[in-house]
Amino acid sequence: MADEEDQFEIQKGDLDGLMAKHTHVRRWVEDFEAQHGSRPYFYGPLDRGAKEIEPRNLIYSLKPPLFAHIYKPPDDDEQGAGTTLWFGIEPVLNEEEEVIRQEIVDRLLRDAPSAPSFTSDSEFEGILEGMIERMTTTSTSLIQTESVLGPAMGFLGFGESAIEVTEEQLVRLKYIIIRDLVKSGPLEALLSDEMLEDIHSVGLRYVNMDHKVFGMVTSNIRFRDREVLTRYLRSMSERIGRPVSDSKPIIDGALLDGSRINIIFSDDVSMLGPSFTIRKFAEETISVIQLIQWGTMSAQQAAYIWLGLENGMSLLVSGETASGKTTTLNAILPFIDHNVKIYSAEDTPEVKVRHRLWQRLVTRDSKNEDSRVEMFDLLKAALRSRPRYIIIGEIRGVEGATAFQAMQTGHPVIATFHASSIVKMIQRFTGDPINVPARFFDNLNFAIFQEVVEAPGGGIARRITGIDEVIGYNKFADGILTRGMFEWDPVSDKHYFRGMFQSHLMENKMAPMMGFSNKRDIYDEMERRTEAIQRMADRDLTHYDDVFDLLDVYYQQGWEQFSSAIDTWVGVNH
C-alpha cells in the first residue's frame, strides 16, 4: 500500500521523479530515448483526456510497480506508421539474475512441502516473500539454518548458504517469482491495465488489445517459443479448472479476477498456432449510477428497470459481443428486493450478487458424461429450490427453452442474450436450436438492447439503444406484439422515453401489483424514482456498495428513509 501511495505522490508530468523512484522505468525511458530520439510524458492514472495529447507518447500508471507506455510512431516511421503501440513496463531480470531466479525457484519447490498452508493468493504471496527473504541475503555473510529459521523449519539445508543479492535485485526477483508462480506470468502487465478491454493472442505474434481510450493497440509482449506458449496455456487452463488438451482444444473459463478467457489450443484447429482471447472485467463491479454518468443509460431508464425488477418482471439484456451486457446485468441487480432468494446459473462465473440469499451454480465439464453438469441441469435444480429470481449468465442454446419454462412456472428470469434488436431476438428464440413456441413469449416482459458506439469525444462507448416491452402472442396476426419504451438518439446522445401512457407492462402488471387504484399513477412513481436516482448521480454516489446499501435502506426501512439517506450518505469514494 505504501508503494502505491508513493507512486501517486509523483506529480503528473514529473517523469524525472518517476525515473528516480523506479529503476526499471528509468532504464526503459533511457533505452526508448536512445532508439526513438523522443522523451515520453508521464500522465499518471489514465483517463479519456489522454486521447488529446499529441504526439501520442505517454507513460501512465498501472498497479505498482507496473506502468504502460503508449506510443504512436510518426508517419515517416515505415515500421510502425499508423499503429498505436502499447508497452508494458515492469521489472526485468538480466542473465545473471535469471540464474539466481531459477536457483530460488528450485529451492522453493524443494521446500514447498514444509511451508505453511494458505487459503488465498495474498497469503501465498506473503509466504513466498518470506521464503525468498530467508533464502537470500544482501550482505556477504552466510546464514545457517539455525540462525534464520530454527532447525524445525527446513527452508535452508544445513550449511547451505543464502544467495547474495543487492536490495534492488531482491525487489526484482520477488516481483518476477511471485508474478510467475501466483499471478499471470508474462501477461501480468496486460491484466493489470484497467483500460484494456479485450486481449488477443495468436501463436507467436505480438499480443493485440482493445483499449478504452486509444482503440486497437499492439503490445511489446509475445511468446517467442511454441513450447513456452503451450506450457503456459496448459497451466492457465488447469488453474481455472478447465484443462485444455489436443483432444479438447477449445475451452471457455474465467480468470481469478472474473475476466473471461477462451483458449484454442490445437494447431489443427488454430492454424497459426495456439491462441487465446481474454475479455477483461473491471475489478470493481460497475454500478448503475456509474453507467448513468457514462451515458450508457439514463436515470429514467434505471427507474423503469427498478420498477420492473422490484415487481418480478422477467427481462433479457441483449446485444452483440462486447456490448457490455454482463456489466449492465450486474449493475441492475441491486434493484431486486433484497429480502428474496436468488439463484444464478452460469458456464463461467461472471454474475455478482450481493443479496443475502444467493445460490451460485456453475456448469462442470467432464469427459465422463455422468459427471458432467450442464446448464439444463442447473436450471432444473434451481426450479426445485423455488427462488424468487433465476439469473442466467448467458443464454446460448437449448437452455433458452428451459428459461421460458421457468418463467411459465412463475419464476422471473434475468439473462443476457446475443441479439441486436427485438425482431432478431424473437427470430433467434423461435428458431433452431432454441425453438421457444411463439405463444410462450408473453412470459418475457421486456428486453434491454445495448450496443458499442463511437463515443462523443472519440474512442468507444456503450449505450442502451432501446428498451422494448413484450405484450404477447397475437393468434390472429400469428406474431408477437412488442412496444418500444425507450430509444437512443445518436445525434444528441440522449435517451428518450416513448412510453408515456402507453406502457402495457407498467399500467397492466406493475400498477396493480403496487396497489395503484389509478393505473396511470405508476408514471408518477417512475418519475419519483428517476429524481432519486439522479440525485445519487449528482452526489457522485457511484460505488457499487453505496448503491446497494442505499437501496437496502429502501427495502428495509421504506421510501422516506431512503430518500433522506441519499442527501446524507457518506460514499465509499468520499
Image: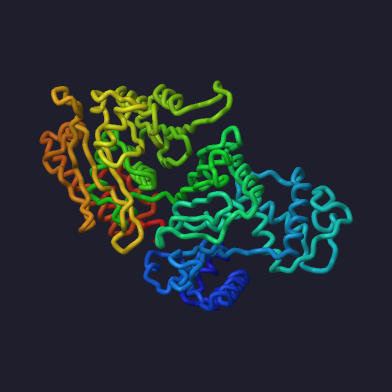
Q: How many marks?
A: 0
Residue 525: horizontal and vertical position, in percent? 18, 43
- Percent x, y for residue 186? 60, 55
Q: Position of residue 330 (x, y in %)?
A: 38, 44
> In front here: 477 or 528?
477
104 is higher (above) or lower (below) than 358: below
Q: Residue at x 51, y 72 (%)?
A: 9
Residue 344 appears anywhere in the view: yes
The N terminus sits in image quarter: bottom right
Q: Kindly identify the residue that appears in the image at 80 percent across and 57 percent down.
A: 148
Viewer-closest of 480 and 568? 480
Give the image quarter of residue 501: top left
Residue 508 vertical placement versus 451 (above, below): above
Question: In this orientation, which residue lies closer to the viewer: 90 or 315?
Answer: 90
Would residue 259 be found to the left or right of residue 493 on screen?
A: right
Measured as percent of width and height from the top left, residue 152 is found at: 82, 47
